[in-house]
Amino acid sequence: MEVTREIFRHFPLWMEISFYIAAFSAIGIFLYGFFRRYKKYKKGRPSGRFNQLGKRFAAASKKMATNETIFKRDPVAGWGHLLIFWGFVVLFIGTTIIAIDHDFLELVFGFSILKGTFYKVFSLCMDVFGVLFIIGLLMMMFRRSKKIPQLDYARPDMKQGDFSRKGYKIDDKIFMWVLLLIAISGFMIEGLRIAVDKPDFEVWSPVGWQLGHLFRSIGFVGDNAFFATYWFHAIIVFIFIAMIPFSKSMHMLVDFANLMFADDMSAKKLPGVTEEKMKESMGYTKLEDFTWSELMDFDACTKCGRCHVACPANAAGTDLSPRDVILDLRTYADSKSGISEIFKQTFSSTNNKKEPALAGDIISADRLWSCTTCMACVEACPVGIDHLNTIVNLRRSLVEEGNMEDMLQDTLQNLGDYGNSFGKSDRMRARWTKGLDFKIKDARKQEVEYLWFVGDYASFDARGQEISRKVATILHSAGVDFGILYESEKNSGNDVRRVGEEGLYEMLAEENIETLNNAQFKTIFTTDPHSLNTIRNEYPDFGGNYKILHYTELLLQLIKEGKLSIGNKLDKRVTYHDPCYLGRYNGETENPRNIITALGASLVEMPRNRSNSFCCGAGGGRIWMDDSHMKERPSENRIKEALTLEGVDVFVVSCPKDFAMFTDAVKTSGNEGKIEVMDIIDLVEEAVMMPA
């Protein structure tokens, strides 16, 4: 017997024709649905993501092949998805090879490659990866049965009964079960064929070989059983193909594209507002305001819930869920594009407005203002969705309407009038230096090696001022040549931009850049990670290109060079909090840890650390807003986490806003005396022997 197999085994002609009619019908429905989604993306503005296509393709391919973004902090999902992914890919390639061989090579050229040794290896690979595919599906089904928090579709902004997400749950189940039935029925077809034909070489199809023996032993053989199973398998496959653009299956196509066209500077550098856009609105008010990549973001969401459980605003009991923002915008975009969602969320009541506002109605103002812009959602997302950029652009619409808290309105007014969030005269910005026994250089008048961009909280907040004096004293004792801008420094604007006040941000940035360009220095350093982020990542768009360091990098450099002599090894067990804008935004996590260990202290890591750090709740302008409505402030949640660490009584920070937020949180959570919040400069001061 020839080592091969008949594709349409014993099929009459009418059955073969019916197969192709059904196949092309399914493909036609798929293409129609995909074209409708493509038309939706075409409505979006240009996104500028077509640079370095080769590099983008390679990076996305690596992420997909290794499933590295899915493994992150969830190894069970990582392994399950990896088996499903590669099982599906190999089975799809195998099916494609069969189609090419039967419908092209054999039909046109009269020869087949599915013979002999190639066929044996082909059969073995298909069986092995088919089994892995089934194992992966069963793993993910078991994971879903555990009812883990991220897979809970409850909305924090609505009561049960006001909405229904049964459609989402049905979609999830259909997706998993259809794939499982396709795999199982495929093996059954193979087993029935082997049971009847009994070819010895089919031992290379180990699963089919064993099933063939089983079917023969129970008498489940014959053409009728084969035909019935074959058509059951084929119909399920065709239904699956046709449903792809209308169901969760769409993520199989969109996610690769979304990873490929993701912005590496997502959240770190927010886009400005073009002059053309300014004529209409500063923010997003209609579907056409979104870029095509943002519209694709909405379809890429798999509802995995990782952003939902990572969000500090959601943990605090606010109405915000980054997942729900994306899903609500998907529903809105589909309805505006005439796309029918088969499996969708429904609401008990609808907005009666003829044209509900994107910011305020579709996505409520409370949800948008709850965001701390900590970037946890963006970092957690396995498919490259940029929640933060969308939220900020919707905030811009709220700011334009004046739809914000009075406290925030007053702060923005202070920033416009005085250049700082405290509403203090610019002459008071350097008043903190009066407690020093030396004069800090004026970098506007004297050339310095390091220019210290101090920031608002380090300049005006009483707790921050004390830390600033310690930093200045340590650096002075180490012989560092540094200066400040005195009253010419303005708020860097990082949080102003993330509030959504783009015009004010640009004014602050341009004023600071003009001042910096007139000063004489080599490098900027700052104690404020928020200032670090915008000066490093956003000022270059306005002509401000500077080398900027966080003060922990400078301190570690001084320790390594011996300019700071450690004379008193610290006998402390401490934990360290990674500031969002230092760790997650800018990837700087090791310098503070290296300082702590160099000082002799024992560092105990919190469960959430480095890029997975939990926000203090200050970012995105939240420090200027009321948080009394929260069930538990993010800063209090973080302090409780630190208190679970055995023997730790010091909570180390490296951000003035963190120091303010966490010292307050220790008091409001009733944990005074149990843990002490210290800036990293406090540890350095204790450990370092300063020259007289």
Image (cartoon, rainbow, N blue to C red):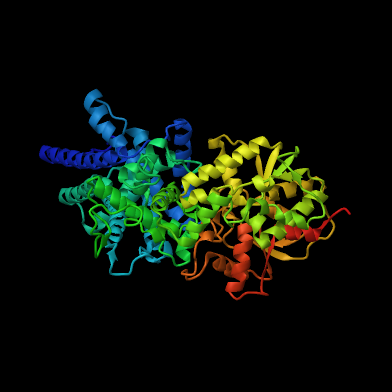
Q: In the figure, 428 relative to 2: above or below?
A: below
Asked whether 574 or 521 is in front, the reply is 521
Whether residue 298 is visible to the viewer of this picture, yes or no, is yes
Asked whether 179 or 489 is in front, the reply is 489
> x, y percentage for residue 125?
38, 42
Whether residue 194 is visible to the viewer of this picture, yes or no, is no
Is 336 left, or right, of 79 in this rendering? left
For the point 32% across and 30% down, the residue is 113
Q: Residue furthest top?
A: 109
Q: In the figure, 585 relative to 639: above or below?
A: above
Say which quarter of the image contains residue 544. Answer: top right
> x, y percentage for residue 672?
65, 74
Is 392 left, or right, of 36 in this rendering? right
Q: In which quarter of the image is the C terminus?
A: bottom right
Q: Residue furthest left?
A: 14
Is 210 left, or right, of 409 in this rendering? left
Q: In which quarter of the image is the N terminus?
A: top left
Q: In the figure, 682 relative to 126: above or below?
A: below
Is 494 left, or right, of 572 in this rendering? left
For the point 61% across and 72% down, the residue is 667
For the point 47% across and 54% down, the residue is 377
> x, y percentage for residue 504?
50, 46
> x, y percentage for residue 327?
34, 54
Asked whether 563 or 505 is in front, the reply is 505
For the image, the number of numbered tags is 0
